[in-house]
Image (spheres, rainbow, N blue to C red):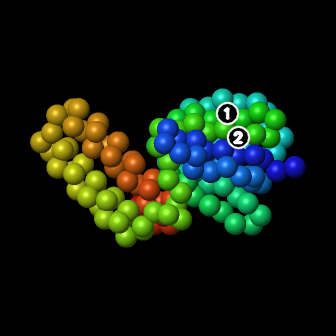
Amino acid sequence: MPLTVRVIAPDKTVWDSSAEEVILPSTTGQLGILTGHAPLLSALDIGVMRVRTNKDWSSIALMGGFAEVENDEVIILVNGAERGDVIDREKARAAYSEAETRLGQVRSSGSRQELIQAEKALRRARARFQAAGGMVQV
């Protein structure tokens, strides 16, 4: 019996389908979910969620939230999400490069608040770029 997976953002349902496996970016690291998983509630970090249907993997950029697993149902409530197959890879790469440049500028002359905002913007840009299939040096 496959998992039922739903990714729900404030403005739309990003994913609502069955899957064999889910990998989530939890705040404590990557979290893999298969059928028969024990009940779980976990905070999610900004990152890329991967969903396996048959032998194909799909990527979704998540902007933080929560996941609940119970009875082979995975409900993911997030602040924002975007499927990797609808993200323009070149635009995502450019946004990631801009976010890196901005972080470098803020590190040398910005306030603590600006630094936190620039780091969060970089993490979001990285998640979008990776979900679109881009490779990032960490």
41 in relation to 108, above or below: above
Q: Locate residue 28: give its quadrant.
A: top right
Q: Residue at x 43, y 60 (%)?
A: 129
* Location of the C terminus (image quadrant): bottom left
Q: Is residue 58 left or right of residue 105?
A: right
Q: Position of residue 8 (x, y in %)?
A: 58, 41
Kind of residue sitting beneath label 1: Glu
Q: Position of residue 112 (x, y in %)?
A: 21, 32
Q: Is residue 68 left or right of residue 72?
A: left
* Dot placed on the residue nearer the N-terminal end, 2 or 1: 1
- Camera sees residue 58: yes
- Disc 2 to disc 1: CB gap under 8 Å: yes
Extreme-bottom residue of the structure:
90
Distance (Cα) linking label 2 and label 1: 6 Å
Closer to us: 109 or 129: 129
Q: Which mark is residue 68?
A: 1
127 in relation to 116, above or below: below
Extreme-right residue of the structure:
1
Q: Which mark is residue 100?
A: none
Q: Position of residue 132 (x, y in %)?
A: 48, 64
Q: Locate residue 38: give its quadrant.
A: top right
Q: Is residue 18 left or right of residue 122?
A: right
Kind of residue sitting beneath label 2: Val
Q: Residue at x 72, y 35 (%)?
A: 69
At label 2, counting other C-alpha atoms closer than 10 Å, the crowd grade (few under 14, some 14-19, many 20 or more) is many
Q: Locate residue 24: give its quadrant.
A: top right
Q: Residue at x 57, y 58 (%)?
A: 59
Residue bearing mark 2: 74
Element at badge 2?
strand
5 in relation to 57, above or below: above
Element at badge 1?
strand
